[in-house]
Amino acid sequence: MLVNLQTIIGMAEKGNYCIPAFNVYNTETVMGVIDAAEQEKAPVIIQVYPRLLNEEVGFYLCPAVVAAAQRASVPVCFHLDHGPSEWEVTRALRWGCTGIMLDGSVHDFDKNVEMTKHIVDTCKSVGIGVEGEIGHVGSVNDAAMDEFTSPEEAAEFVKQTGVTCLAVLVGNAHGHYKKPPKLDIERIKAIREATGGTPLVLHGGSGIPDEQVKAAIAAGIRKMNIGTDVCCAFADGTKATLDDPQRSLAVDLFMKKPIQYVKELAVSKIRLTGADGKAQ
């Protein structure tokens, strides 16, 4: 059930829901997400940060993700998150990714378009869709947030690049929010309309209040990224195991609780985004 980005985003578009996209870091986080997706009969995206491709861990992790997706009973897309250059994109394709994000948002508009269009054309030759970004989604630790995505710029960006979906800045950020964010739902609607109904992507999905997530999905968000919450769930499961005086030192047994905590987190996000039951 390993599918490409355009297939899984197309499912969400047709059903008016959102695909949860979980960043994974090791085999245990992959297991937790896949277990949740199969239990909930939900299509999911499993994605990796480019640093994992730049380090040895990617060599081991990527084949595990591909194997898990191929064996899964639900559609799974294996996606590169925030690919900064052609180098990471090429390695991601070589190691089995079926979706690519080229993030040129740190560059000016013309450079972003040039980089993204090149990757769209490259990936098209192997049948893989591309996510772009217009309006740089930064970190909660940044001193200030960049200007929100302009509907007019978004429309021009989509027209010139032909991306499958588009990540936007509408009050969201990466990391743990210091206070609950306030998404600009009307801007999401405006971007969606200006781009002719292009599926939109919400980065920084960890910690956004549920009611805002639902409103964003109703406005046109079709992919939501969850990374920080996966890390926290895994850490909480590890801490719970460490706090148990009867814990086993066998690593496979030690990891059972972290896997379960990740699964529970993934189940909650699958239900929040409305993806549960959509793979039946």
Image (cartoon, helix red, strand yellow):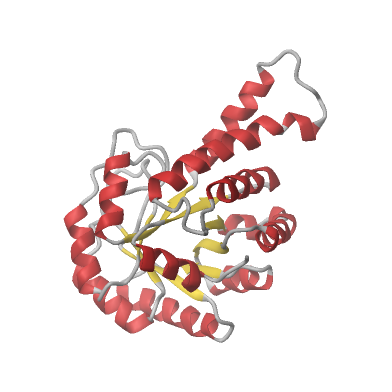
What number of labels is visible? 0
Q: From the viewer's perspective, tell me whether residue 258 is left or right of residue 8.
A: right
Depth order, front residue of 209/44: 44
Point out residue 114 in the picture as x, y percentages from the top left corner: 40, 81
Point out residue 116 in the picture as x, y percentages from the top left corner: 43, 76
Point out residue 266 in the picture as x, y percentages from the top left corner: 52, 43
User: Residue placed farthest to the front in the image?
Assistant: 280
Point out residue 215 in the picture as x, y percentages from the top left corner: 25, 50
Depth order, front residue of 269/227: 269
Q: From the viewer's perspective, tell me whether residue 167 is left or right of residue 259.
A: left
32 to 157, vertically: above or below: above
Depth order, front residue of 117/206: 206
User: Residue placed farthest to the top in the image?
Assistant: 245
Q: From the viewer's perspective, tell me whether residue 236 is left or right of residue 224.
A: right
Which residue does the image show at 53% across and 83% down from the upper left? 122
241 to 277, vertically: above or below: above
Q: Is any part of residue 100 visible from this angle?
A: yes
Q: From the viewer's perspective, tell me whether residue 271 is left or right of residue 198.
A: right
235 to 35, vertically: above or below: above
Which residue does the image show at 19% across and 59% down from the upper left? 187
* Quarter of the rendering occupied by the N terminus: bottom right
User: Residue placed farthest to the right in the image?
Assistant: 250
121 to 246, vertically: above or below: below
Q: Is any part of residue 105 visible from this angle?
A: no
Which residue does the image show at 30% across and 43% down from the upper left? 143
